[in-house]
Amino acid sequence: MEPIRPITPPNSLVWRIVHFPIVLLLIGIALLFGAAVIAGKVSHAVQHADNGWLAVLAAILVAAIFIAFYCAFVRLVERRPAVAEFALPGAVKELVAGVLGGLLLFSVVVGIIAVFGGYRVIGQHPASVLLPMLAISITSGVTEEIALRGIFFRLVESWLGTWIALILSAALFGALHLKNPNATLLAGTAIALEAGIMLAALYMLTRRLWAAIGLHAAWNFAQGGIYGIAVSGFRQDGIFIPRLTGSDLLTGGSFGAEASLPAMIAATAFGVILLILAYRRGRFVKPFWARKAAAQPAALQE
């Protein structure tokens, strides 16, 4: 398939420079930093440590700010008339599918760990513990998908093709988690293989961000909010109070189940299935040199 390209005015050197993929990527990153600064101030003004509902409201506002900045980037910088990545027709269906998929997939991971004796429920917290984790999940789902899939993967893919974009974005996603508490090289590799492949493939299938946001947020929510397992190294209180026993390969250790062998197998397998579906539906983009070579014979025939 053809990549999503910016609309470059003819005979404009300035816009040709702006629309060069590396320049676009740098502008996109700068805008995300701007969104993060504004979102941080808004979140600080709204949030209150003892009010879970205000935390959720703050998360929704942060998500709205990032989406607004992304839409401004598409419309004003890329000059595309429509933001297809956040198109509204079908958005609810894709978002719900992503949420259900994330909840189910992580439940499968916990089920496998439990079968091998690594997870057991020993107590329960009140339902109010769900609100802080819901806020965290909304924020991470929206902001990270916009940054990693909407900006980085999409722009690199339009230039260097799907395979290189997939490898680079997955490696970047894993590397960014290495700064988290209790992170190890294995944990970063697991994140790259699981989420890096799965979420990029989900974006490729839909060419929109709704399903990827839903799955990302629901995975985090299930992990921390429901099953009480650390989320990427950050300890969370969930509805269930668990006892984790066994090797770190089985449970993921203090980083969380994302670094476990069951998660690596289940999530990576699901990601590969999504990749196969995307390939069969012609959703892969060739690198610019391959597109250029393919266009030359057609030009000669004309």
Image (cartoon, rainbow, N blue to C red):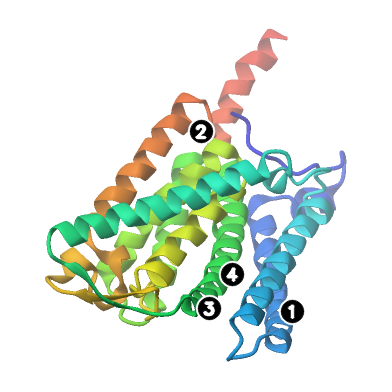
Residue drawn at x 35%, y 43% as measured from the top left: 270
Residue 124 in the image: x percent, y percent?
A: 34, 77
Do the residues bearing badges 1 and 4 touch, measured as CB atoms within 8 Å?
Answer: no
Q: Where does label 2 land, which residue? A: 284
Please name the amino acid that badge 1 sits on.
Ile
Name the one closer to the observer, 153 or 126: 126
Sort mark 4 into few (<14), some (14-19) or many (20+) by Cα contacts within 10 Å: many
Gap between marks 1 and 4, in whole Å?
A: 14 Å
Q: Quadrant for the C terminus, please.
A: top right
Sort mark 1 into few (<14), some (14-19) or many (20+) by Cα contacts within 10 Å: some
- Which circle, 1 or 3, is nearer the viewer? 3
Residue drawn at x 80%, y 55% as measured from the top left: 77
Q: Where does label 3 land, which residue? A: 132
- Which circle, 2 or 3, is nearer the viewer? 3
Residue 231 in the image: x percent, y percent?
A: 39, 72
Gap between marks 4 and 3, in whole Å?
A: 11 Å
Q: Where does label 1 land, which residue? A: 38
Q: Where does label 4 land, which residue? A: 139
Do the residues bearing badges 4 and 3 touch, measured as CB atoms within 8 Å?
Answer: no
Sort mark 2 into few (<14), some (14-19) or many (20+) by Cα contacts within 10 Å: many
The answer, for residue 14, to whether it is visible in the render is yes
